[in-house]
Amino acid sequence: MFDLFSIGIGPSSSHTVGPMRAGAIFVNDLRESQLLDKANTLKIALYGSLAATGKGHMTPQALLLGFEGADCETVDTEAVPTRYEAILRDKVLTLGKDTDASYGDAKAIAFDFEKDLVWKWGQTLPMHSNGMRFSVFDVNGDLIATNDFYSIGGGFVINGKMAVADVPGPRPMREGLEAPDGAQEPGFPHEAAPTTAVVPTDADKHPEDMLENVFYKSIRRDDAGGDRRSGVTPHADETDLPPKLLSIGGDVQDEPDRPTPGQKEPRFPFHNMASLLALTRKHNLTIAQIVYENELTWYTPEEIDEKIMRIWSVMDEGIRAGVHSTQEVLPGSLQMKRRAPKLYRRLMRGLYMGPRRLGNMNGPDTDEIERPKGAGEVERLPKPQRDAPSVPAKYMRREASRAPTIRGSFQHEIMPVPPRRTNFPAMDWLSCWAIATNEQVAAGGRIVIAPTLGAAGIIPAVLRYVVEFVALSPEDEENLVRTFLLTAAAIGMLFKRGATISAAEGGCMAEVGTSCSMAAGAFAACMGGSPEVIEQAAETAIEHNLGLTCDPVDGLVQAPCIERNAVGSVKAVVSANLALSSDGVHSISLDEAIHAARITAADMHMKYKETSLSGLATTVKIPVAVPEC
């Protein structure tokens, strides 16, 4: 769960967080191989989607800071541009300077960005579209080590064993890289280091050595337990599952001992929704309880609670920072204006009236707004004063002075319709919170990867709605936060195992579709839905995201990404409500929908997989400022 929900910096989990981790892993491997001191220059090659949209996704910044040891969970986001500019200006990269002292010493090397980072447009490495190739050379220009890395979505990185030149003297160059000045080339054929990019015979599986760190996000392999490096083999059938706690008939069984932190295998392993539902029936546990029991394999109850609340705290802070941001325009060529602050001000002004005011749109104002509090209850809240600090008076005067603009002829048989206000506060709060989060992502802020950064706004928005409008007490709020995130994690695990969460593999379907499905199932759980209803909610959400393309304009995680999260959050709640209003019996299972997502991803053209080579990315014309000659 805590690998699926990790903390990173924007704008992308696959193009920013993944490369940052890859750089740190490579430097650590150099240390462990006693090669870091010999490094003199570094060559970087970016392939596929990383090459196509890496500049707009801040991939170079993430890579270079990753080589220096920056941690995406703790790095000062405001200092990233300054440090990046210093590296480019000084042409010096200090490998491992920001890592813990226990990792070893740092090493300063020469790095010329224009020569040492190569964009391999139109080329891909065998395993994944998000491929990276790192090679280091000694003072003589001889290649001493190289490895391929793949950012597979959600900040996860896979790589094989680093290839090391074990024979002194000149070595030929690795294919696809230019040698430093004076170095010998060409060559170092790909097969010279087969473990760095082995093509699997079974297209549905990664080779064993490449599978390792799919299951953890540590920089050093030794920091992860052996079972975390290869995953858990699911039981062949339900008869092999752990003893049940309570049968459906109510017969209490002997409860097996809870796992202790460090125990090898989770208590309740599952590999698809069918096996997960079987576990809930056999042991009379909710989906959230199943995931919680599994997390006890690695953490104590106190650690689990602390980590869950930490995740929610960062999510909530991302929303708060987004709605209170004073930055008017997002970085990048689109010059897109932030909208969350204005949406938030409108909502806080009480523009959305309670039902009793709907019949008198032009009647006297009220001092109260209504917020749904629970089952059948409505809490009266005082409407914020117009001079409240969170809503500057200048904005009030500016918006109040605007006269409505009506286009159309009043002499026509079809009269123009004057502007009207809708009364959908739930949708507007969801949209506001989702947009706030993704505007922070676009600005390079620190956000929870849920399960990716491109789709990071949906789960926080829906969870914020649960906390704000569903929770009945502080104790209930805490329980709902845990239930929501644990349930969402279970669904996310199924997508990661059965399909993909990488837009470079499955378009936006893999990101927004997965996040929408996770949020829908989690919302249903927080509304008391059974595991079968939760499955139906999750299936409905992904079913109506199948085939969703990823075609970001100018390679930026802004258009259509930000609005798509707002729509996804509303779609998640609608999907959950449809499931909650049914009996849990449905025609399509979540496993079938996930398999459909996998097939759709395989059939989708590469142009629609985060390459900005078609769709909106090519139809939207971006004005180019031409400097005076």
Image: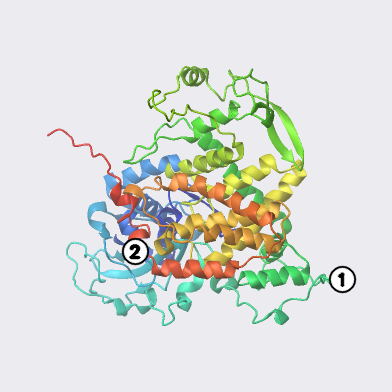
Residue 148: x and y in percent read: 36, 68
Determine whether the residue tagged by mark 2 lies in a helix, strand or loop: helix
* Amino acid type at image mark 2: Met
Q: State left or right for residue 152 relative to residue 249.
A: left
Three-letter amino acid code of the residue under disc 1? Val
Q: In which quarter of the image is residue 358?
A: top right
Q: Residue 252 carries which label?
A: 1
Quadrant where the C terminus is found in the figure: top left
Q: Quadrant of residue 5?
A: bottom right
Residue pointed to by mark 2? 606
Q: How far from the left and from the top, in percent, is residue 626?
A: 19, 37
Q: How far apart are marks 1 and 2 (CA)?
A: 54 Å
Which residue is more in the foreground, 291 or 621?
621
Q: Is 61 on the left or on the right of 460, as rendered?
A: left
Residue at disc 1, secondary structure: loop
Position above or below: 456 against 356: below
Judge the density around disc 1: few (<14), some (14-19), many (≥20) Cα neighbours within 10 Å.
Answer: few
Q: Residue at x 56, y 59 (%)?
A: 4
User: Mark 1 or mark 2, which is nearer to you?
Assistant: 2
Any part of residue 402 in sight: yes
Is residue 74 visible from the viewing direction of this image? Answer: no
